[in-house]
Amino acid sequence: MPSDVHDVTRHAGTERPFSSPMCAHFEPGFYACACCDTMLFDATQKFDSGTGWPSFTQPLEPNAVAYFSDGSLSSVRIEITCSTCDAHLGHIFPDGPAPSKLRYCVNALSLKRIA
């Protein structure tokens, strides 16, 4: 596993915003965990959030990701991880589009695109 993927997935690192071409990639397909290949997101739920990280309105299956309170910054956020291998994926925010109004903000390094 490349060191940048390891840093993000195993040490809750964050890649620089707009550092991945995955942000602008909207073709049909699926996104799996970079560590264990568990299917996590469907490209039909992907949207351009303008944040610099791939964003989704929901996971492929409700139990595909796990949720944890993250108080590492000055405010409490909700961390999302792969429910199979605990890889850090990113965070979820309540500012997404309808109908879910959720934004799963995911590090591209934690994902593999599956056509």
Image: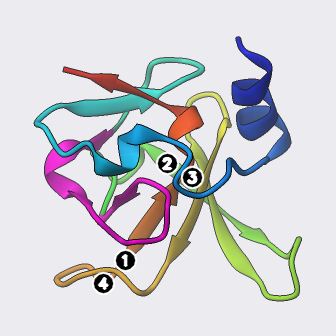
Q: Amino acid at mark 2?
A: Val
Spatial CA span between label 2 and label 4: 17 Å
Identify the residue under disc 4.
101
Residue 2, horizontal then vertical, whole percent:
72, 15
> In the rendered image, which quarter is residue 46 located in?
bottom left
Q: Give above or below for 1 relative to 20.
A: above
Spatial CA span between label 4 and label 1: 4 Å
The region drawn magenta spans 41-57
Spatial CA span between label 3 and label 4: 18 Å
Front-most of residues 47 and 61:
47
- Residue at the (25%, 79%) spot, across then down: 100
Of badges 1 and 2, the one in the foreground is 1
Of badges 2 and 4, the one in the foreground is 4
Of badges 3 and 4, the one in the foreground is 4
Identify the residue under disc 1.
102
Q: Which is nearer the N-term, disc 2 or disc 4?
A: 2
Residue 48 lies within the magenta run: yes
Q: Amino acid at mark 3?
A: Ala
Residue 80 lies within the magenta run: no
Identify the residue under disc 2.
65
Residue contact between numbered discs 4 and 1, judged by CB atoms under 8 Å = yes
Residue contact between numbered discs 2 and 3, judged by CB atoms under 8 Å = yes
**Quadrant location of the C terminus in the rendered image:** top left
Identify the residue under disc 3.
66
**Quadrant location of the N terminus in the rendered image:** top right
Q: Which is nearer the N-term, disc 1 or disc 2?
A: 2
Residue contact between numbered discs 2 and 4, judged by CB atoms under 8 Å = no
Spatial CA span between label 1 and label 2: 14 Å
Spatial CA span between label 1 and label 3: 15 Å
Residue contact between numbered discs 1 and 2, judged by CB atoms under 8 Å = no
SS state under label 1: loop
Q: Amino acid at mark 1?
A: Leu
